[in-house]
Amino acid sequence: MRLGGPVLDKYAGPDEWVAVLRDLGYRAAYCPVGTDATPETITAYARAAQASDIVIAEVGVWNNPLSTDEPARKAALAKCRECLALAEAIGARCCVNIAGSRGVKWDGPCRDDLTDETFALVVESVRSIIDEVRPTRTYYTLEPMPWMYPDSADSYLWLLAAVDRKQFGVHLDPVNLVNSPAVYFRNGRLISDFIGKLGPRIRSCHAKDTVLREQLTVHLDEVRPGLGQLDYRTYLRELARLPGDVPLMLEHLPRPDEYRAAAEYVRGIARSEGVSL
């Protein structure tokens, strides 16, 4: 397993990028370039990562391939293909997006999202992205979400079977799967179940935390690792059993000091569990 996170400092090339990652103590990184990068630039970063034993964990897309606005949907699918091609070129473990929503907000809840019709649309969009790019060393993945597919280990298994493409992989963000008090208070079981069912296909993971507030009705907030109740001991132990040095990527924090605190918390749990990051 490898801990990583975003590079907030500016860097002027592969050498500076590697130097920042080393200073942060990261052995995994988000993709350092965008889809507009030249082939030469992509190759330079790929070689620097390999030479420095840095794993490029993921290329993030973050758009809505299921938009009900057809021009927007076509543009989103085109961006997905561009990002998957970038992941293939730079040697990232995966390209990751959410499945998308039929609602107004690209990543928000909609009553139409957890339906058989939308499931079929997700399958169609994922197939089209993979079939157009035809990657051989990277994977297209979907980050789990609390209100859209995949919203559980079982729904991820259904998608894997339905899509039926070798280069369709798995992304894990357990906080996004905690969507009820019953799951919140027993989230270690959720983590063990997900990794037990999908572990060999997991390409990258996110590291954050969740806290259940006291006001009515159910209200869950995403917080920095260590400030919530995610069972990091179980999370790290389960990930450590997987082959291939799976990246664990910090995200969604506002400042460098927050990332340092998050990294130190995760490293502290890892040390106590005898897990290498």
Image (cartoon, rainbow, N blue to C red):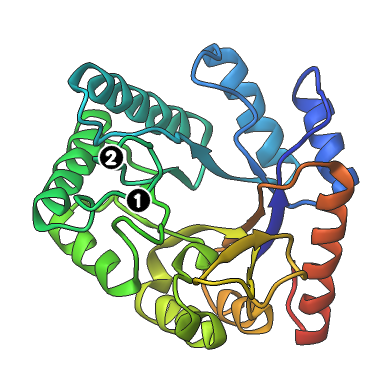
CB under 8 Å between discs 1 and 2 = yes
As drawn, the label of residue 47 is none
Name the amino acid type tagged 1: Pro
Name the amino acid type tagged 2: Gly
Q: Quadrant of residue 247?
A: bottom right
List x then y, in percent, for residue 55: 63, 47
List x then y, in percent, for residue 263: 81, 60
Q: Is residue 32 left or right of residue 76?
A: right
Q: Tell me, yes or no, if residue 171 can be seen here.
A: yes
Q: CA distance from mark 1 to mark 2?
A: 7 Å
- SS at mark 2 in the image: loop
| Upstream in sequence: badge 1 or badge 2 | 2
Q: Tell me, yes or no, if residue 25 can be seen here.
A: no
Q: What residue sits right under mark 1 in the picture?
A: 109
Front one among 97 and 239 = 97
Q: Is residue 269 above or below residue 137?
A: below
Mark 2 is surrounded, within 10 Å at the Cα level, by few (under 14), some (14 to 19) or many (20 or more) other residues, namely some
Q: Is residue 42 above or below residue 166?
A: above
Mark 1 is surrounded, within 10 Å at the Cα level, by few (under 14), some (14 to 19) or many (20 or more) other residues, namely some
Residue at x 15% of width, y 57% of height: 115
Q: What residue sits right under mark 2 in the picture?
A: 103
List x then y, in percent, for residue 198: 37, 72
List x then y, in percent, for residue 39: 52, 15
Q: Is residue 74 above or below residue 277?
A: above
